[in-house]
Amino acid sequence: MAALSGIKVVELAGIGPGPFTGMMLADAGAEIIRVDRIGTGAMPHLVVGRGRLGGIEVDLKHPEGTETVLRLIESADVLIEGFRPGVTERLGLGPDVCLARNPRLVYARMTGWGQDGPLAPRAGHDINYISISGVLHSFARAGERPVPPLNLVGDYGGGAMFCAFGILAGVIEAQRSGKGQVVDAAMTDGSAVLSAFIHGMRGIGGWADEPGTNLLDTGAPFYDVYVTADDKFLAVGCIEPQFYAQFLAGLGLDGEDLPGQMDRPGWPALKARFTEVLGSRTRDEWTAVFQDTDACVTPVLNWDEAAAHPHNKARGTYAATDGGVQPEAAPRFSRTPSKAEGAPGTLTPGLLAGWGLDPAHVAKLREAGVLSGIADD
């Protein structure tokens, strides 16, 4: 049995961090029904769509369609929605209505800007949300423009992960109080929280506002990515003095007259020397030099190489599912393990009966075109 077995979730179909939140909960055993608007078709089986019980298409313009979703919500512990503020209210599925039907419901709202504020009604994407939180500014080398860190910091780190945390906190509290509440998860807020350490460093004068000049943003020569002789890359992260000493020894520079590790004016000279030496061998040759040391030097792997790496294979970090490779569930539980499941299942009238929907009524709505995507038992 997984950690969230027995927790029921209704997921109003969306894109980006909403499905990722659902994936995290499904991996941990939550039972999730995804609700799509009728005629849109179910979400293709991307990895983030894995593990659901199934999906149902509902005509939300029809009163019976809205009522069907509310019936599902009556049986649920959690609802996830990722629309702009006000959309679910217009659909008749806003938090006031849903909490009236199910007072212990945790109603999770996943947006970029949040439910209020001047930008709340505006469109945006990951790059926009992390630009106004101050985070994007720091993803740059000195003198260069910022580079978006894929959609990992806004959509998934600052968005979905904080939404999942809010859901779990809300479920735990609801089990004590019997009362649900609304979780307002905004990517701007979450990405700002992810930068807490940087704000702390700035507060003590340990972080300059100019990107690419600091300890962790490629300013330091001992915390950077270097090109090897075969035009591949090595990641170097030897911050602590004892690890830095092993790095110099591996490079054969431990007896050379070099600037001190924390001598900032000497950093350009150190970086030039490291660039020269690391460019003299291939990535895999340097990997062999450092693999049994604490020098904090690792190869930069592409997706296929990462799945095949011995450490990842030993831990089962990647799983082969549905003919493809995808990340296995995380974190690890000692007693109630999570699992990366495959494609969503198919809903049936019998399964929906466990969510409070009478099979005869479901059959009537299917015939009327209010519901689709349901298989026969």
Image (cartoon, rainbow, N blue to C red):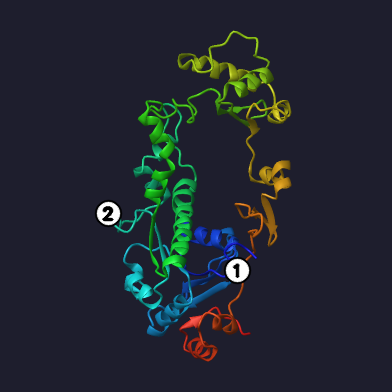
**Residue placed under numbered mark 1 in the picture:** 344
* In contact (CB < 8 Å): disc 2 and disc 1: no
Element on which disc 2 rests: loop
Q: Compared to 203, does 104 lie above or below?
A: below
Q: Which amino acid is tagged 2?
A: Gly
Q: Compared to 49, does 357 lie above or below?
A: below
Q: Residue 286, how many percent across, how many down? A: 70, 26
Q: Quadrant of the C terminus?
A: bottom right
Work out whether residue 323 or residue 344 is closer to the camera in this orientation and state it: 344
Res. 8 in view: yes
Q: Residue 107, how many percent across, how many down? A: 41, 66
Mark earlier in primary sequence (2, 1): 2
Distance between mark 2 and mark 1 Cα atoms:
36 Å
Q: Compared to 373, does 127 lie above or below?
A: above
In the displayed structure image, the side of residue 301 where residue 359 appears, left or right = left
Report crowding for label 1: few under 14, some 14 to 19, many 20 or more residues within 10 A (C-alpha). some
In the displayed structure image, the side of residue 69 where residue 352 appears, left or right = right
Res. 40 in view: no
Q: Quadrant of the N terminus?
A: bottom right
Element on which disc 1 rests: loop
Q: Residue 142, how many percent across, how many down? A: 43, 26
Report the residue at 46% width, 58% height from top. 169
Report the residue at 45% width, 14% height from top. 265
Q: Compared to 140, does 337 lie above or below?
A: below
Report crowding for label 2: few under 14, some 14 to 19, many 20 or more residues within 10 A (C-alpha). few
Q: Which amino acid is tagged 1?
A: Pro
Q: Determine the image quadrant of residue 63.
A: bottom left
Q: Residue 239, how many percent across, how many down? A: 55, 26
In the displayed structure image, the side of residue 161 where residue 307 appears, left or right = right
Q: Looking at this view, name the residue that lies furthest to the top.
A: 257
Report the residue at 61% width, 27% height from top. 227
**Residue placed under numbered mark 2 in the picture:** 117
